[in-house]
Image (cartoon, rainbow, N blue to C red):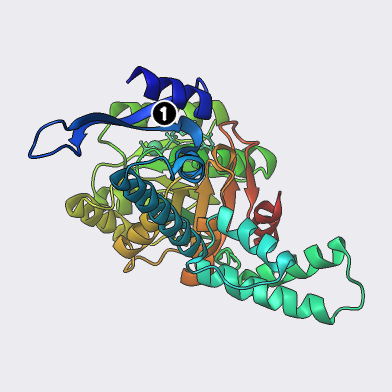
Amino acid sequence: MQEAMERIKSELGNEAVILHTRYFKEGGFLGLFRKKYVEVTAAVDNNVYDDLATVKEETSADLAPQNREIVSDLAAMRKMMQEMSFLLGNLGEPKFPKIGQTLYHRLIKQEIDNNIAQKIVKLTIDEYSRTPLQTKEELNKIFLANLLKPIQKIRYEPAPAKQGKPRILTFIGPTGVGKTTTIAKLAAISAVMEKKKVALITVDTYRIAAVEQLKTIGDIMNVPVKVVFNPENLQECLQDMLDFDVIYIDTAGRSHKNETQVNELKEYLGSAHSDDIFLVLASTSKYQDFLDILETYQDVNITSLIFTKLDETSNYGSIYNLVYKKKHPISYFANGQNIPDDIEIAEPIKLVQMLMKE
Ligand SMILES: Nc1nc2c(ncn2[C@@H]2O[C@H](COP(=O)(O)OP(=O)(O)OP(=O)(O)O)[C@@H](O)[C@H]2O)c(=O)[nH]1
Ligand SMILES: [Mg+2]
């Protein structure tokens, strides 16, 4: 054993790790005079397979037949693993020239759907190969145009104002996405900056804190806040508010998985006769969650989406996928907690610019 350790140390150095030790007997006559052997398999930790191969080359002549077999099996396994990892790495990767690969990986990193990414990159490199001016700026211009084209026309248009009637804007969405904060931002812009006559209604009576939150916002902006407890109550309340310009209706956060809660919300929506129903979503959620939420509200006439918490993510691909596939326009992007500053109108070009940020 001591001799084996010395050889390992001299061939692989002090960093060598013992992988396997085995004692066995060989040779002799009628079970007598058999020689005792020790077999030690060692490798250097950070590159196990390479070092085993080196040992093989240098010492295979000295090794017992079983050892030679082990070493050659390990070498075959190493080759197989290399081939498999190469195949896995290339699985589903489209064959673009180098520029195309870079663009493709940028989109995939942003979590853009693979098929959409391939389509956009293909269009971009086809167009780029035909352009006489082959510069990085030109490439980026073509890339931006191809990203923008499919979503350019999916724009939010506010419902036209009805003569002598308030605009009724209702905000729905999962819990904690920022519905109330978004209402506070938009209501502050309407009331304070645009000098409109604004009222706030909350149907979120499940939590005292929710009512208090809206009342505080109303107090600061000096706009009335009404609390309603059932759908009939909401209708009556709206009838009494005909002389307002804009009415913001806040709803309780609803898990799209809770059917009872969702149905209750839908009853309120039936009573509100909203001009706009905004589905508020946090940009930090997963794409599949977006799809599930939209599915839950498929019988609701959602007029646009609002994405909040853009300040908390750098991946905008799932938002792009959603607009591309489901064709729902986005009305606002919210990017922070400051009221009313952290909100902006969501032009399709803004989404593309966010995606292109390197
Ligand atoms: N970073 C960040 N935080 C936000 C944004 N919008 C809202 N928030 C924060 O998210 C938290 C929840 O916001 P709310 O407005 O109460 O969310 P909600 O959807 O009304 O919540 P429920 O009524 O409980 O369903 C608060 O701490 C907000 O300050 C945003 O754009 N960015
Ligand atoms: Mg709320």
Q: Is mark 1 within 8 Å of ligand 1?
A: yes
Frontmost residue, 325 versus 295:
325
Can see residue 166?
no
Describe residue 172's horizontal placement relative to residue 97 as left or right. left
Q: Does 197 sit above or below residue 154?
A: above
Name the residue at the front extreme. 29
The picture places residue 175, in percent across and down from the top left corner, at: 35, 41
Frontmost residue, 190 versus 328:
328
The picture places residue 237, in percent across and down from the top left corner, at: 35, 48
Q: Quadrant of residue 18?
A: top left
Name the residue at the right extreme. 133
Describe residue 7's horizontal placement relative to residue 162 as left or right. left
Frontmost residue, 326 versus 68:
68
Give the residue displayed 51% in from the left and 41% down from the top: 58
Q: Does 209 sit above or below residue 27?
A: above
Frontmost residue, 314 versus 274:
314
Q: Does 159 sit above or below residue 258?
A: below
The picture places residue 199, in percent across and down from the top left corner, at: 48, 42
Give the residue displayed 74% in from the left and 65% down from the top: 99
Name the residue at the top extreme. 2
Residue at mark 1: 213
Give the residue displayed 45% in from the left and 57% down from the top: 79
Quarter of the image with the N terminus in it: top left
Under circle 1, the secondary element is: helix
Describe residue 105's horizontal placement relative to residue 44 as left or right. right
Name the residue at the left extreme. 30
Give the residue displayed 15% in from the left and 30% down from the top: 33
- Classify 10 Å Cα crowding around label 1: few (below 14), some (14-19), many (20 and above): some
The amino acid on which the numbered mark 1 sits, given as a three-letter code, is: Gln
The picture places residue 204, in percent across and down from the top left corner, at: 31, 39
Can see residue 257?
yes
Q: How many marks?
A: 1
